[in-house]
Structures are given as C-alpha cells and as structure tokens.
Image (cartoon, rainbow, N blue to C red):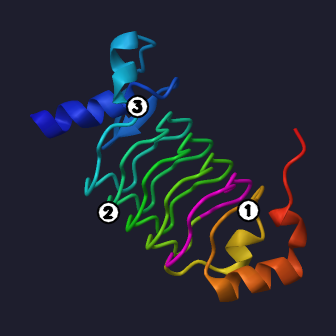
C-alpha cells in the first residue's frame, strides 16, 4: 500500500491530469501534495507513465525505470536520474538543468528542446550526437570528452549561455 500511495502522491503534483496503468488521475492543487516534490522514487518502476508537466525538481529517481515514460515539459531540475532507464522516454522541452544523469540509459530518448544546462551526463549510456543536437542548451553541462568534442565542433551554439 505504501508504494501505491507514493505513486499516487507523485501524480498529484503535475498540474494536469495523468494516466497511470490506464486509469486517469485527476490532479488536485491541494497543497498537501506539494511535499511530494524532492521525494525518493529510487529504483521504482514507472515505465510508460505519463508524467508530462510534472514538477519533480530535486527528486531522487536514481535507478528508476522510466523507459517509455512521457516527461514532456517536466521540471526535473536538480533531479537525481543516475543509473535510470530513460530508454525511449519523451523528455522533450523538459527542464533537466543541473540534473544528475550520470550512467543513465539514454537509448532512443527524445531530448528535443530540453534544457540541459549544468546537467551531468558523464557515463550516460547510448547517448548520441543526434540526440544532443536537438536540445535547447548544454551550457555548463558535463559530457563524455569525445562526445563533447563532437557536439562543440558541429553545434557550438549549444554551449553558449542562453539569452533571457
């Protein structure tokens, strides 16, 4: 029961309706659920979950299974995604600033328009030049040296500070 409560709690902070295991959960602006931000979901299986627009800043999602998850425009700033399975996940336009993505599986992950400023992508697995070419910014991001060299050569603008 405890695990179910945590998952339901997680989905109430989104500001829009979410679908979990085929059931729609109508979100509530109730402040009681704001404490779910920066929660610990380490190792949890959230594969295929729709968490678009989620407010998960500072949340521990290390080793979590987020494969095929929809995280479009989610706030994952300063989140711990180390070792997470992000394969085929939709992180388009997500805020991943200062997130720890070290060792995560990025196979087929959609990063279009994602803010990756200050993100730690060292040891990220299956991360490609093509994926990184579509992000919004890599300003101060930590990348594997060879991949960083390739990105800087082809897409130097990604390492420049964004104009506000």
Q: Quadrant of residue 73?
A: top right
Is 104 positioned to the left or the right of 33 in the image?
A: right
Point out the tag, 3 or 2, that comes first from the N-terminus.
Answer: 3
Of residues 157 and 1, the one nearer the viewer is 157
Percent coordinates x, y for residue 145 in the rendering? 66, 85
| Label 3 to label 1: alpha-carbon separation | 25 Å
The residue where tag 3 is placed is 37
In percent of width and height, residue 93 lies at 68, 48
Q: Position of residue 96 (x, y in %)?
A: 59, 51
Q: Which mark is residue 55?
A: none
Q: Which mark is residue 138?
A: 1
Which residue does the numbered mark 2 point to in the structure image? Answer: 63
* Residue under the point 59% across and 54% down: 91
Expressed as whole percent of the image width and height from the top left, the position of residue 35 reads 35, 23
For image coordinates 41% across by 64% down, the residue present is 82
Extreme residue toward the bottom, this view = 146
* Sequence-first tag of 3 and 1: 3
Measure how far apart labels 3 and 2 are at the Cα level.
18 Å
**Element at badge 3?**
loop
* Rendered position, 13 above or below 126: above
């Amino acid at each position: 029961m405890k695990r179910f409560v945590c998952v339901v709690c997680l989905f109430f902070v989104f500001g829009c309706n979410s679908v979990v295991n085929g059931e729609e959960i109508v979100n509530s602006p109730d402040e009681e659920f704001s404490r779910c931000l920066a929660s610990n979901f380490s190792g949890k299986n959230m594969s295929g979950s729709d968490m678009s627009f989620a407010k998960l800043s500072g949340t521990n999602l290390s080793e979590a299974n987020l494969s095929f998850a929809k995280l479009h425009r989610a706030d994952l700033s300063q989140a711990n995604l180390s070792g997470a399975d992000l394969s085929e996940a939709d992180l388009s336009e997500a805020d991943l600033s200062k997130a720890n993505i070290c060792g995560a599986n990025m196979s087929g992950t959609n990063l279009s328009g994602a803010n990756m400023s200050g993100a730690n992508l060292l040891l990220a697995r299956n991360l490609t030049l093509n994926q990184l070419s579509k992000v919004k910014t890599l300003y101060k991001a930590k990348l594997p040296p060879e991949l960083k060299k390739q990105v800087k050569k082809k897409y130097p603008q990604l390492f420049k500070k964004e104009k506000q």
